[in-house]
Image: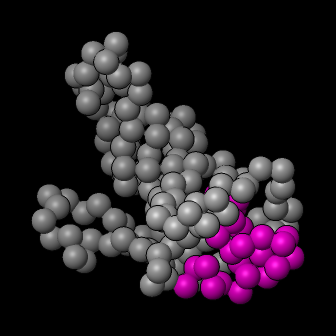
């Protein structure tokens, strides 16, 4: 990606880079373009505060994938999320998406259900109160949707075990 002509690509990004990977990349003499974005799993059960802070410090925007967890995860059923949804008159999914946006990162969510697509996009004109954001950020449960367990084909560890 570093070798792409500037007229062909204005920005490049990385995915699942931890602090160590980013430090290696940024300190490599061959690095001429700093990634604009790091796409990582972000939700209240996987907030990765050290990584998010590092990215902000070096000017890399975080883009959160799986902001709703997954069908098998319990993040949308987290009592703090449900309480905030009821308090704000929103769906748990909207609360999770707004939590990510108000924390300063982008969110990537997908659905084939037209009702969910519309609901997930109704995020303008309201915000979570600071105490609501802090409450959601205080979740102690840790869960990753994606892990390296089933990904033995990868040449290196991608999905981290530590609380980056």
Residue 56: x and y in percent read 58, 42
Toward the top, the furthest residue is 7
Q: Is residue 96 magenta?
A: yes
Residue 87: x and y in percent read 86, 76
Identify the residue at image location x=83%, y=50%: 125
Q: Is residue 116 left or right of residue 16?
A: right
Identify the residue at image location x=79%, y=82%: 83
Q: Nearer the viewer, residue 74 or 37?
A: 74
Toward the front, the furthest residue is 114
Name the image quarter holding residue 145. bottom left
Q: Is residue 155 left or right of residue 109?
A: left
Residue 33: x and y in percent read 36, 25
Q: Is residue 91 magenta?
A: yes
Write the start and end of the magenta stretch as one range.
74-100
Name the image quarter holding residue 34. top left
Q: Please tell me whether the stretch drawn in magenta is mainly helix, strand or loop.
A: helix
């Amino acid at each position: 990606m570093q070798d792409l002509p500037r007229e062909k690509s204005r920005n490049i990004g990385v995915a699942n880079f931890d602090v160590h990977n980013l430090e290696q990349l940024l300190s490599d003499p061959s690095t001429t373009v700093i990634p604009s974005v790091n796409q990582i799993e972000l939700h209240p059960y996987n907030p990765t505060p050290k990584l998010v802070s590092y990215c902000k410090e070096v000017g890399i925007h975080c883009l959160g994938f799986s902001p709703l967890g997954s069908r098998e995860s319990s993040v949308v059923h987290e009592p703090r999320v449900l309480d905030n949804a009821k308090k704000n008159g929103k769906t748990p999914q909207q609360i999770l998406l707004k939590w990510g946006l108000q924390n300063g990162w982008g969110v990537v969510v997908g659905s084939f259900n037209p009702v969910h697509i519309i609901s997930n996009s109704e995020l303008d004109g309201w915000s979570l109160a600071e105490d609501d954001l802090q409450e959601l950020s205080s979740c102690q449960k840790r869960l990753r949707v994606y892990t390296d367990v089933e990904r033995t084909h990868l040449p290196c560890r991608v999905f981290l075990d530590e609380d980056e």
